[in-house]
Image (cartoon, grey):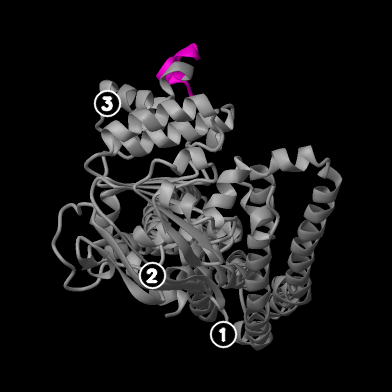
């Protein structure tokens, strides 16, 4: 689908407004012909003919025409601006809806800058096309056609001489259109890269400062910014090649008209008033010739941005609710992995994993960094689909369940904690917007967050910074845990949720969790033995495989990997994976 067909899908509902705007523009075009005509009559009938009685009427007609033109021009510009803003509003909504429908795989591969460029610069190019380019193209085309017709009625020979230059203008405009579009595509691509780099530096500003890498990042930015400037200069070099020709065409027409028109007046082949009218109407040829280069430039800019948006919108989520999905308002918490294998591209992450988890059980997962622990629980939420084997929830393959209903029954406190720029209450109640203050306080108490929240002057109304700036790692973890608990899920997943809290606080949290998790299945990913030793099932994951599973005492008795970790006390899994045991 090209950009014009795509845009028409949005413009279609406003087609009568657009037609009305163009009709008003057509009236403006007609009124624009009145003043030059009146000027010619003033010269022929008033100045040379001595008929001063007509002067007042002709001047009044010019004034009224100018006034009406101003009002009508304001009206049609208002129409086009209204349509453009409404269409872009809908386009942004659709882009955002598409963005939220995409799965983890899409975000793993797509730069943030690309997404932001689609939402900002590209949509603005679309808006500019609708609010200015459309009526300018319509207006200048009609001015040119109507102007030629009227000028032919005044003096057809002079008009034919002027039209000799138009094939040159047409060829130049065509070359500009075909040459400049690829440069706009390159500009949009580089703009995305620049956006991504800036976004990364804003998010990672603490790392930059901690390593004193400001100069390094400045140089990186200068390279990307320089590349963006270079691509714009390449585009500008094309304009500089063709636009002077288009722009100078108007001046050439004026020179030809003055020379030949003056000759015709001298030899009585046209009156002085006709020459004045002709000169006053010459802008109907000059302006379109001068504007066509800029209009073509903006059309190609729109085409490039439109194709970028279309390309983005053509992405389809790899994970969605399949046809014939099992109708189940809420899953319970029976989970079974059957010979599950998973890989990111060619990189194997999990291989032949099998286990059962039942309602009321706590399943703990330990293992070295990169072993596949987080991936395992991500598969339960169906953030990714397994490559081999199957995952059953309530004896139903997760692929046959409604994705939204499945995830509504699961709460996850992720390893990479994200908190919104909102109040503490708003962050805790994110999954349950209608939660009462008592519910929020209950979740905060279970998560061990109540005490430190009350220490803030504004308590639960405290605004926290983007991604939880202003809170310690342990405080962020406890708010994330409270957010998960408030959801009252059937399946609770805690991915390294208490790694940043002290042992005493962790013990209090675990004691409270054990009281409220009797009817749900809880998954705990942790590095500390103290976090997992009371679990009903402990799985040790190494290199994507479950190498040991059982209860704490059973695994200690096996004298295997888990025993080694236990003896190390602090669970330095990376050293253990390298064969080092303290």
First in residue order: circle 2 vs circle 3: 2
The residues tagged by marks 1 and 2 sit, at their Cα atoms, a distance apart of 74 Å
Q: Which residue is mark 3?
A: 439
Q: Callout 1: helix, strand or loop?
A: helix
Relative to 578, is 501 above or below? Answer: above
Q: Which residue is mark 2?
A: 385
Q: Residue placed at 25% from the left, 45% from the top? A: 360
Relative to 262, is 30 above or below? Answer: above
Q: Nearer the viewer, mark 1 or mark 3?
A: 3
First in residue order: circle 1 vs circle 3: 1
Q: Residue placed at 65% from the left, 55% from the top? A: 576
Magenta residues (range) = 453-464
Q: Are marks 1 and 2 in contact (CB under 8 Å)?
A: no
Q: How many marks?
A: 3
Q: Position of residue 557 (x, y in %)?
A: 47, 52
* Residue toward you, 72 or 92: 92
First in residue order: circle 1 vs circle 2: 1
Q: Position of residue 463 (x, y in %)?
A: 48, 24
Q: Residue placed at 42% from the left, 58% from the top? A: 549
> In this orientation, does residue 28 appear?
no
* Residue toward you, 9 or 485: 485
In the image, which disc is placed on residue 156?
A: 1
The residues tagged by marks 2 and 3 sit, at their Cα atoms, a distance apart of 34 Å
Q: Callout 3: helix, strand or loop?
A: helix
Q: Position of residue 530 (x, y in %)?
A: 49, 37
Relative to 408, is 123 above or below? Answer: below
Q: Nearer the viewer, mark 1 or mark 2?
A: 2
Q: Residues within 10 Å of mark 2 (few under 14, many from 20)?
A: some
Describe residue 469's horizontal placement relative to residue 578 as left or right.
left
């Amino acid at each position: 689908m090209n950009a014009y067909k795509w845009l028409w899908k949005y413009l279609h509902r406003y087609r009568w407004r657009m037609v009305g705007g163009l009709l008003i523009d057509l009236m403006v075009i007609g009124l624009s012909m009145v003043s030059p005509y009146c000027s010619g009559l003033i010269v022929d009938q008033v100045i040379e003919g001595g008929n001063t009685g007509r002067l007042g009427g002709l001047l009044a007609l010019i004034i009224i025409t100018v006034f009406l033109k101003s009002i009508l021009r304001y009206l049609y510009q208002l129409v086009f601006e209204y349509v453009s803003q409404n269409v872009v509003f809908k386009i942004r909504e659709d882009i955002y809806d598409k963005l939220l429908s995409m799965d983890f795989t899409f975000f793993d591969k797509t730069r943030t800058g690309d997404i932001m460029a689609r939402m900002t610069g590209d949509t603005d190019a679309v808006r500019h096309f609708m609010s200015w380019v459309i009526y300018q193209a319509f207006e200048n085309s009609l001015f040119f056609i109507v102007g030629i017709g009227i000028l032919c009625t005044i003096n057809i020979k002079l008009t034919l001489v002027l039209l000799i230059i138009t094939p040159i203008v047409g060829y130049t405009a065509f070359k500009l259109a075909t040459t400049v579009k690829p440069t706009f595509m390159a500009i949009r691509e580089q703009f995305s890269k620049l956006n991504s780099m800036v976004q990364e530096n804003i998010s990672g500003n603490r790392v930059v400062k901690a390593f004193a890498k400001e100069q390094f990042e400045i140089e990186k930015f200068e390279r990307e910014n320089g590349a963006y400037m270079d691509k714009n200069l390449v585009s500008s070099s094309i304009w500089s090649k063709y636009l002077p020709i288009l722009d100078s065409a108007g001046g050439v027409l004026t020179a030809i008209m003055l020379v030949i028109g003056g000759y015709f007046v001298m030899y009585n082949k046209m009156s002085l008033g006709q020459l004045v009218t002709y000169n006053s109407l010459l802008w109907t040829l000059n302006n379109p010739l001068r504007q066509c280069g800029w209009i073509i430039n903006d059309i190609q800019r729109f085409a490039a941005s439109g194709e970028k948006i279309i390309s983005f919108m053509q992405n389809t989520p790899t994970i969605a609710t399949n046809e014939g999905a099992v109708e189940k308002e809420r899953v319970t918490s029976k989970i079974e992995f059957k010979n599950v294998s998973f890989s990111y591209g060619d990189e194997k992450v999990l291989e032949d994993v099998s286990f059962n988890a039942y309602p009321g059980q706590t399943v703990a997962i330990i293992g070295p960094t990169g072993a596949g622990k987080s991936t395992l629980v991500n598969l339960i939420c169906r953030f990714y689909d397994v490559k081999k084997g199957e995952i059953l929830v309530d004896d139903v393959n997760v692929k046959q369940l409604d994705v939204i209903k499945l995830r509504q029954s699961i709460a996850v406190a992720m390893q990479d904690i994200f908190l919104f720029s909102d109040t503490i209450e708003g962050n805790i109640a994110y999954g349950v917007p209608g939660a009462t203050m008592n519910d929020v306080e209950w979740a905060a108490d279970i998560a061990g967050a109540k005490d430190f929240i009350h220490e803030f002057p504004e308590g639960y109304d405290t605004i926290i910074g983007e991604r939880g700036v202003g809170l310690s790692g342990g405080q962020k973890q406890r708010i994330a845990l409270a957010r998960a608990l408030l959801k009252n899920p059937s399946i609770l997943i805690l991915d390294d949720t208490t790694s940043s809290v002290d042992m005493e606080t962790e013990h209090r949290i675990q004691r409270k969790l054990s009281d409220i998790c009797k009817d749900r299945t809880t998954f705990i990913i942790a590095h500390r033995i103290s976090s997992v030793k009371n679990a009903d099932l402990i799985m040790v994951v190494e290199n994507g495989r479950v190498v040991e599973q059982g209860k704490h005492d059973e695994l200690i008795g096996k004298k295997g990997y888990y025993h080694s970790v236990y003896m190390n006390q602090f669970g330095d899994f990376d050293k253990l994976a390298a064969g080092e045991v303290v």
